[in-house]
Amino acid sequence: MSEVLLKSLKKVYEGNVTAVHDVNLKIKDKEFIVLVGPSGCGKSTTLRMVAGLEDISGGELYIDGKLCNNVAPKDRDIAMVFQSYALYPHMTVYENMAFALKLKKVPKPEIDKKVREVAQILDITQYLERKPKALSGGQRQRVAIGRAMVRDPKVFLMDEPLSNLDAKLRNQMRAEIIKLRHRINTTFMYVTHDQTEAMTLGDRIVIMKDGFVNQIGSPEDVFDRPVNLFVAGFIGMPVMNFFDHCKLLLENGVYYAQIRNAKFRLDDFQQKALKQNGQKPCDIVAGIRPQHISVGSGQLEALVEVNEMLGSEVNLHTRSDDDEVVMVIPTVDLTVDVSMGSRVKFDTKPRLIQLFDKESGNNLIWYDKASADACSPVCKAYPFS
Amino acid sequence: MSKNKSTAVATDPKDAVTLKGNRMKHLRQNCPWLLMLVPAVLVVFLFNYLPIYGVLIAFQDFMPGDPILSPLTRWVGFQNFTRFFQDVQFWPLMSNTFLLCILGFIIGFPLPIIIALSLNALKSRKTAKVIQTIFTAPHFISLVVLVGMLTLFFGRYGLVNNIIAGIGGERVSYFLESGAFRPMYILSSNWQDFGWSAIIYIAALANVDPGLHEAAILDGASRFQRVIHVDLPAIMPMVSVMLIMSIGGLMGVGYEKALLMQTDGNLGVSELIATYVYKQGLTGVPDQAYATAIGLFNSIINVVLLIIANTTSKKFSETSLF
């Protein structure tokens, strides 16, 4: 068992600057959790508090059921992979990997066995006698992972480990980490600002902003059921389209979303959810993902400003009244002229429209007040969902 | 590979033209920077290279006022050098200079490194800066003031003797004691310069990736182990360079402080090559040719030491000056 529990974890720096506000998070044994958010959101600080590299200003941290607030990093049974690799430059790869075990006074034959075993898994055996400066970025990152692996930690912490790699290598290493995760089968806590990494690696994703957790959920949850405008806008590429000046209407017991002059009768599921929440008609921001738009017919119209042909799909940057609307249209579905300057009609399925309260920015369907109040916001679960 | 390329350049006139064009382009591009170098190059040439011409008098029967090069110049070859080697002062001068320098080096070289590592290990940056300032301040005291302070502390009626006399002991004239010269000289020099010399190491330590320390903390390294395994290796290239430079200047001790501390009582240990050169060349009946020969001999020793240190360092630590 290597469960990590963050109970109202808080970090306040000198000058009363709060970097992390009351994070409540339970990371299950062998779970891969990803902390994602823009720069300065507190994700790395949270990870560093778990590592013991930052003092905890408030709350409690439990690793494997043991309160670790004041436990030295070396005694937490964790290992960390840094963005800058943090390999000792004067040591060979072998020495780098063996260093922690040497300090623990593990017998030499055992160290040797462990280092070679891990090196073989990571395919770095041929580099064991090299110094880090003689390795490429990808190889260095493997060594950094290897150095963490030899310790057999209960929890693996990774702080933007792929950020220093080029796009191609990053994709390759991401796949390697997925494979590695299944091979070593331990608890992972991974920090990134890259949503692709978050979506592909994480069992659950923790989305942070300004020191607050905005949503905790599976990749599907955060993509399909964002609890607020920030999560909806942060996850997904291209970014979700937001339509201002929209209304949620209730006519004869039926909810409608009004976007400009177009009126969409919401799906049964949305009807039930809104009714259960006792939702009254109000001003809303409607969100539609670029991939959820179809062109050719529909109640809405836009002017194509830029047309990006990507082969299998085409990205259309359009303007609909005051709003910029991005559409991702599979080329096989293209039946109308989408050249620059042309006007296209577009549509979406009502169930794919996200409804956000104009004032609070919370999702009228998925925002769960109870979990948000407990600083552990998840999307609301409905008995009929 | 580069050899083949240069051969091709030399044989192909088109390539030679291109190379020349590239050089001109490079020169034009870097013109402002090269112009900025001119004053520095001029100063170095005027004050460091041009005076080398004066070493010619070491090989002459030179009298003050004679031109260095003229048809009347009396060349004497290595006669001035031979005279120095046969001088009764040769071995005492060599041993005094060597001992003073080597003892000063043994104590003075590691001290700034230890200080820099210790200051860097302090958790409070503010405290570290205050201590660093205190340690650096003595560097700005002039040698005359420093020797004046030594007199105040160790003179017959100085602080130390007053304490000794106060507890019933007998006053000692430390400046007349030959055994006290070297400790006073070396310790006061180190006191004056260790803080200043530490600055370069402190600067090097500031560049150490904090991630390395964090990785070492997670690996279970103690504060001392982090100094040994992270900080020290990080400044080793700088240590190597400083070591080479120190060894290169090992015998280049100045005459000022030794002269200021010199008394009849400690002359046997305080007479150094530098003080002897000063006395021969500038006091009494000046024998500048002889003084230059001794100075040149001393410089040659330094150059040889520099080359040995540089070659050794290159071989074992991959760091060298040239």
Image: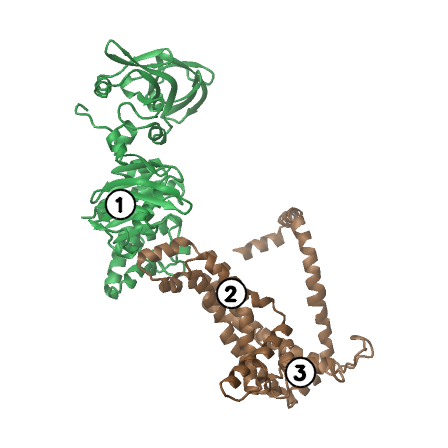
Chain colours: A green, B brown
Residue B23 appears at what percent x and percent y? 64, 50
As displayed, is residue A94 above or below residue A180?
A: below
- The answer to which of B109 and B195 lies nearer the viewer is B195
Q: Which mark is residue B276?
A: 3
Residue A306 appears at what percent x and percent y? 46, 22
- The answer to which of B234 and A295 lies nearer the viewer is B234
As displayed, is residue B284 above or below residue B250?
A: below
Residue A183 is at least partly visible in this image: yes
Q: Which mark is residue B198?
A: 2
Residue B252 is at least partly visible in this image: no
Alpha carbon separation for disc pair 3 and 2: 32 Å
Secondary structure of the residue carrying tag 3 is: helix
Instruction: Name which quarter of the figure residue B50 lies in.
Output: bottom right
Secondary structure of the residue carrying tag 2 is: helix
Residue A100 appears at what percent x and percent y? 30, 59
Badge 2 density bin: few <14, some 14–19, many ≥20, Cα 10 Å = many
Q: Nearer the viewer, mark 3 or mark 2?
A: 2
**Residue shown at 26%/23% (left/top)?**
A365
Chain letter of the residue carrying label 3: B
Q: Which mark is residue A188?
A: 1
**Residue shown at 49%/76% (left/top)?**
B106
Amino acid type indicated by mark 1: Phe
Image quadrant holding the C terminus of chain A, namely top left
Q: Are marks 3 and 2 in contact (CB under 8 Å)?
A: no
